[in-house]
Image (spheres, grey):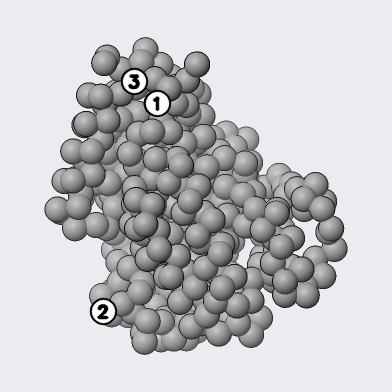
């Protein structure tokens, strides 16, 4: 079958893909939040799904984080973390995800008295169980950049007994006044421990391009999260292209925390041969899982089906899987394209 003339939602949903920028805590759907609150006796001030949905409203990164972190109070036991991740992974499978590298924020939980072990073991159980429905999944432990470097260092050392369960480390939360170099020592130690490295360089923040330069030239990351402001510096674009460093763009969430989903930048980087990828970030809050993000950016940027296929291939090329699995997934994309038949009415 020939490819569709447009990258329809049906086509992008079935397209095999990896998701590389997904915060597990950001997959807390309203119904699950209510169920966990009741189970754990947590008063969240809401009693219906509609009440919870009404709180999932924000206009920028700051207002989003003000909703995001208090919602985590309902997550208290290993089973809670398992249930959250398992629910995401089921949705990911329905969105064509074959491989997921999932962020989690242990400091947001240990600060409330939740043991580190409960967080990582619950999430890892879900990652392991996802093999039953065709998804392989790994964990990336993120540090909250608006906390101290000392807190990040303590969290890193707490992870050492569970190192075999964690693929890499990242840096997220409020970027303002918290540049990458604040955590240079922590990330150097993480690399020594064998972790892969990534850092958020959020869109349109003060000093975005300087932060991108720092993570590339000083920190030495293996991947950059968000990072589309890199188009402001052609030399940095050339550097990530030459080094094969992936960027993890999240179009739908971009349109919530700024006034633009950055579709033009995604298209420019894609056509320049950069390993730009499409992801869903915090889909319970932004209202779109990964297939919705593919469809949104394709429509906005006027991407062809062939370009969308390249985005999917980029997701595996930018992932931290071994070469055999990468080759197998790329071959799966080729088979999908060759055999694609629309299922939409």
Q: Quadrant of residue 229?
A: top left
Q: Nearer the viewer, mark 1 or mark 2?
A: 1
Mark 1 lies on residue: 11
Report x, y in % for residue 49. Answer: 77, 50
Which residue is pictured at 38% across the width and 45% down the height?
Answer: 97
Query: Where residue 341 is drawn, which disc sits there?
Result: 3
Judged left or right of residue 150, residue 30 is right
Density class for disc 1 (Cα within 10 Å; few <14, some 14-19, many ≥20) is many
Q: Nearer the viewer, residue 320 or 329?
A: 329
Q: Are marks 3 and 1 in contact (CB under 8 Å)?
A: no
Q: Nearer the viewer, mark 3 or mark 1?
A: 3
Helix, strand or loop under label 2: helix
Which residue is pictured at 27% across the width and 38% down the height?
Answer: 313
Judged left or right of residue 234, residue 19 is right
The numbered mark, 2 or 3, whose residue comes first in the sequence reads 2
Report x, y in % for residue 238. Answer: 25, 41
Density class for disc 3 (Cα within 10 Å; few <14, some 14-19, many ≥20) is some
Q: What's the distance in space between the residues labelled 3 and 1, CA to CA? A: 9 Å
Report x, y in % for residue 37. Answer: 74, 68
Which residue is pictured at 29% across the width and 63% down the height?
Answer: 220
Judged left or right of residue 39, residue 255 is left
Helix, strand or loop under label 1: helix
The quadrant of the picture occupied by the N terminus is: top left
The numbered mark, 3 or 1, whose residue comes first in the sequence reads 1
Mark 2 lies on residue: 192
Residue 336 visible at all: yes
Q: What's the distance in space between the residues labelled 2 and 3, CA to CA? A: 47 Å
**Vertical order, 131 against 162 (above or below):** above
């Amino acid at each position: 079958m020939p490819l569709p003339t447009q990258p329809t939602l049906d086509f992008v949903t079935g397209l095999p893909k990896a998701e590389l920028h997904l915060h597990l805590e950001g997959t807390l759907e309203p119904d699950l939040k209510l169920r966990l609150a009741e189970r754990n006796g947590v008063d969240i001030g809401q009693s219906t799904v509609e009440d919870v949905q009404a709180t999932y409203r924000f206009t920028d990164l700051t207002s989003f984080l003000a909703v995001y972190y208090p919602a985590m109070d309902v997550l208290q036991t290993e089973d809670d973390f398992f249930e959250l991740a398992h629910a995401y992974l089921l949705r990911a499978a329905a969105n064509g995800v074959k491989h997921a590298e999932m962020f989690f924020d242990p400091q947001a939980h240990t600060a409330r008295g939740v043991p580190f072990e409960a967080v990582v073991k619950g999430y890892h159980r879900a990652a392991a169980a996802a093999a039953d429905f065709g998804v392989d999944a790994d964990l990336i432990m993120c540090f909250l950049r608006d906390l101290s470097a000392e807190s990040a260092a303590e969290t890193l050392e707490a992870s050492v007994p569970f190192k075999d369960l964690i693929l890499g480390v990242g840096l997220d939360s409020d970027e303002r006044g918290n540049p990458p170099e604040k955590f240079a020592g922590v990330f150097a130690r993480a690399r020594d421990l064998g972790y892969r490295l990534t850092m958020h360089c959020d869109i349109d923040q003060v000093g975005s391009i300087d932060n991108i330069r720092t993570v590339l030239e000083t920190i030495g990351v293996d991947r950059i999260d968000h990072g589309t402001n890199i188009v402001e510096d052609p030399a940095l674009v050339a550097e990530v292209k030459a080094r094969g460093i992936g960027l993890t763009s999240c179009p739908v969430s971009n349109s919530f925390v700024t006034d633009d989903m950055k579709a033009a930048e995604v298209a420019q980087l894609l056509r320049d041969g950069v390993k730009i990828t499409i992801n869903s970030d915090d889909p319970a809050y932004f209202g779109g899982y990964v297939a919705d993000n593919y469809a949104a950016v394709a429509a906005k940027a006027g991407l062809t089906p062939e370009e969308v296929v390249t985005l999917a291939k980029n997701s595996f090329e930018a992932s931290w899987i071994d070469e055999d699995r990468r080759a197998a997934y790329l071959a799966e994309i080729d088979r999908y394209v060759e055999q694609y038949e629309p299922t939409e009415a």
